Amino acid sequence: MEGPMSEIDLSTARYSLLAVAAGIDGVLALLDQQSEWWEGAFGAFCLLGLVKAQLERVLEEELPVS
Protein backbone atom coordinates (compact mmCIF):
# COMPACT_ATOMS: atom_id res chain seq x y z
CA MET A 1 0.00 0.00 0.00
CA GLU A 2 1.32 3.40 -0.96
CA GLY A 3 1.49 6.34 1.43
CA PRO A 4 0.19 9.85 0.84
CA MET A 5 1.26 11.67 -2.28
CA SER A 6 4.34 13.80 -1.94
CA GLU A 7 4.27 17.52 -2.65
CA ILE A 8 6.08 16.86 -5.93
CA ASP A 9 3.49 14.26 -6.94
CA LEU A 10 0.67 16.70 -6.18
CA SER A 11 2.39 19.44 -8.15
CA THR A 12 2.87 17.09 -11.11
CA ALA A 13 -0.77 15.96 -10.93
CA ARG A 14 -1.98 19.56 -10.83
CA TYR A 15 0.24 20.54 -13.78
CA SER A 16 -1.04 17.54 -15.78
CA LEU A 17 -4.67 18.35 -15.04
CA LEU A 18 -4.13 21.99 -16.01
CA ALA A 19 -2.69 20.77 -19.32
CA VAL A 20 -5.77 18.58 -19.85
CA ALA A 21 -8.03 21.55 -19.05
CA ALA A 22 -6.18 23.66 -21.62
CA GLY A 23 -6.65 20.92 -24.21
CA ILE A 24 -10.34 20.75 -23.38
CA ASP A 25 -10.59 24.51 -23.97
CA GLY A 26 -9.23 23.98 -27.47
CA VAL A 27 -11.70 21.19 -28.21
CA LEU A 28 -14.56 23.29 -26.83
CA ALA A 29 -13.60 26.15 -29.16
CA LEU A 30 -13.54 23.77 -32.12
CA LEU A 31 -16.90 22.26 -31.18
CA ASP A 32 -18.37 25.74 -30.80
CA GLN A 33 -17.29 26.56 -34.37
CA GLN A 34 -18.47 23.20 -35.72
CA SER A 35 -21.90 23.53 -34.11
CA GLU A 36 -22.88 25.83 -36.99
CA TRP A 37 -22.56 22.87 -39.40
CA TRP A 38 -22.86 19.77 -37.28
CA GLU A 39 -25.85 19.21 -35.04
CA GLY A 40 -24.01 16.74 -32.77
CA ALA A 41 -21.34 19.30 -31.92
CA PHE A 42 -23.64 21.11 -29.51
CA GLY A 43 -24.30 17.95 -27.49
CA ALA A 44 -20.59 17.14 -27.41
CA PHE A 45 -19.86 20.76 -26.41
CA CYS A 46 -22.29 20.52 -23.49
CA LEU A 47 -20.96 17.17 -22.27
CA LEU A 48 -17.34 18.24 -22.52
CA GLY A 49 -18.21 21.47 -20.73
CA LEU A 50 -19.55 19.40 -17.83
CA VAL A 51 -16.36 17.32 -17.76
CA LYS A 52 -14.27 20.50 -17.69
CA ALA A 53 -16.34 21.93 -14.85
CA GLN A 54 -15.79 18.74 -12.83
CA LEU A 55 -12.06 18.87 -13.57
CA GLU A 56 -11.90 22.48 -12.40
CA ARG A 57 -13.74 21.51 -9.21
CA VAL A 58 -11.17 18.80 -8.50
CA LEU A 59 -8.35 21.27 -9.13
CA GLU A 60 -9.85 23.81 -6.74
CA GLU A 61 -10.95 21.48 -3.96
CA GLU A 62 -8.58 18.53 -4.09
CA LEU A 63 -5.39 20.02 -5.55
CA PRO A 64 -5.33 23.67 -4.47
CA VAL A 65 -2.27 25.79 -5.14
CA SER A 66 -0.04 25.69 -2.08
Image: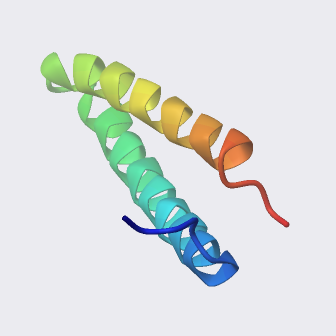
> How many discs appear?
0
Q: Residue at x 62, y 77 (%)?
A: 6
In front here: 38 or 49?
A: 49
Q: Which residue lies furthest to the right in this view?
A: 66
Residue 50, by quadrant, is top left
Compared across the picture, whether 26 is left or right of 64 comes to left
In front here: 14 or 21?
A: 14
In front here: 42 or 59?
A: 59
Compared across the picture, whether 38 is left or right of 42 comes to left
Q: Which residue is drawn at 24% across and 35% down?
A: 34
Q: Residue at x 61, y 70 (%)?
A: 10
Asked which colour scheme the image uses, the reply is rainbow
Q: Residue at x 59, y 65 (%)?
A: 14
Compared across the picture, whether 31 is left or right of 5 comes to left
Q: In this view, does 32 lie above or below 63?
A: above
Q: In which quarter of the image is the N terminus?
A: bottom left
Q: Which residue lies furthest to the bottom in this view?
A: 8
Residue 12, by quadrant, is bottom right
x, y percent for residue 22: 50, 60
Compared across the picture, whether 60 is left or right of 53 comes to right
x, y percent for residue 62: 66, 46
Q: Quadrant of the C terminus?
A: bottom right
x, y percent for residue 61: 71, 40
